Image: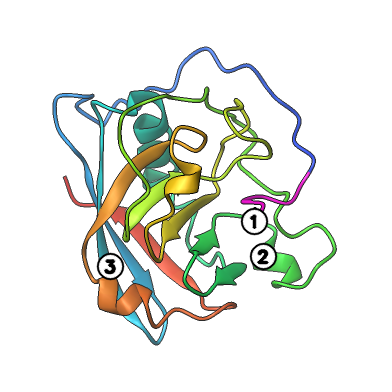
């Protein structure tokens, strides 16, 4: 099976994942991700099914964490993966690419969502582990072998045609919270 994250993670307990500007699990936040030379993708996060993951990602987006990060992994028919801040300084071929994050791990959240085309999953260093942070993946096809082992926390609601054009090394210009 393909490994979804190639790195050695250090689990850091985090007491809270709140974001003052986010209304909480009552609403599904929408994000707008702009990929240089490709276009815009709208993402919907599943606040009820993955509240801590959602809050963490919204907070990172509000802090502009993802601005300038490169897509470091593309497995055709499987996933496109991003979220390693080291790609801003080391590119996509640095020896530790795939090991970076914000430094705040989130607990593994179990839900009944499945890995369908366009669903968002949290990248982990091991299945069902509290090693998720800033790296995530978009499923390029149904990946049911991941169901229950990697938290599904959102989906592409618009722009899957853009996702299908993404290449390894493409730059995330920004990810902004719309609602």
Against 99, residue 70 (above or below) is below
Is 105 placed left or right of 164 in the picture? Answer: right
Q: Are marks 3 and 1 in contact (CB under 8 Å)?
A: no
Residue at (19% x, 51% y) in the render = 178
Q: Earlier in the sequence, mark 3 or mark 1?
A: 1
Q: Which residues are magenta?
A: 3-7
Against 34, residue 105 (above or below) is above
Q: Disc 3 to disc 2, how far (Cα)?
A: 20 Å
Please give the residue where the numbered disc 3 appears in the rendered image. Answer: 41
Mark 2 vs mark 1, foreground winner is 1
Residue at (63% x, 56% y) in the render = 85
Q: Earlier in the sequence, mark 2 or mark 1?
A: 1
The answer to if 78 sits in the magenta stretch is: no
The residue carrying pointer 3 sits among few (fewer than 14), some (14 to 19) or many (20 or more) residues within 10 Å by Cα, namely some
State the image coordinates of residue 119 (x, y, percent, origin top left): 33, 52
The residue carrying pointer 1 sits among few (fewer than 14), some (14 to 19) or many (20 or more) residues within 10 Å by Cα, namely few
Mark 3 vs mark 1, foreground winner is 1
Secondary structure beneath label 3: strand
State the image coordinates of residue 96 (x, y, percent, origin top left): 81, 57
Which residue, as the protein is rendered here, is positioned at the far bottom?
37
Where, by quadrant of the figure, is residue 35 drawn? bottom left
**Label for residue 141?**
none
Q: Is the stretch drawn in magenta largely helix, strand or loop?
A: loop
Which residue, as the protein is rendered here, is positioned at the far right?
95
Comparing 171 with 139, the one in front is: 139
**Label for residue 87?**
2
Please give the residue where the numbered disc 1 appears in the rendered image. Answer: 2
Secondary structure beneath label 2: helix
Residue at (16% x, 45% y) in the render = 179
């Amino acid at each position: 099976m393909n490994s979804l994250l190639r790195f050695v993670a250090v689990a850091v307990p985090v007491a809270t994942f709140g974001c003052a500007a986010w209304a909480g699990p009552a609403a599904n936040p929408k994000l707008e991700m702009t990929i240089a030379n490709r276009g815009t993708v709208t993402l919907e996060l599943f606040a009820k099914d993955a509240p801590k993951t959602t809050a963490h990602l919204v907070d990172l987006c509000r802090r502009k964490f993802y601005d300038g990060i490169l897509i470091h992994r593309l497995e055709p028919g499987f996933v496109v993966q991003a979220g390693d801040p080291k790609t801003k300084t080391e590119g996509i071929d640095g020896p530790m690419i795939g090991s970076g994050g914000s430094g705040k791990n989130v607990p593994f959240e179990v839900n009944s969502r499945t890995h369908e085309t366009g669903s968002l999953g949290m990248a982990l260093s091991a299945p069902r582990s509290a090693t998720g942070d800033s790296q995530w993946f978009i499923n390029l096809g149904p990946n049911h072998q991941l169901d229950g082992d990697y938290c599904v926390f959102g989906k592409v609601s618009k722009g899957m045609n853009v996702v299908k054009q993404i290449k390894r090394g493409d730059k995330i210009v920004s990810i902004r919270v719309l609602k």
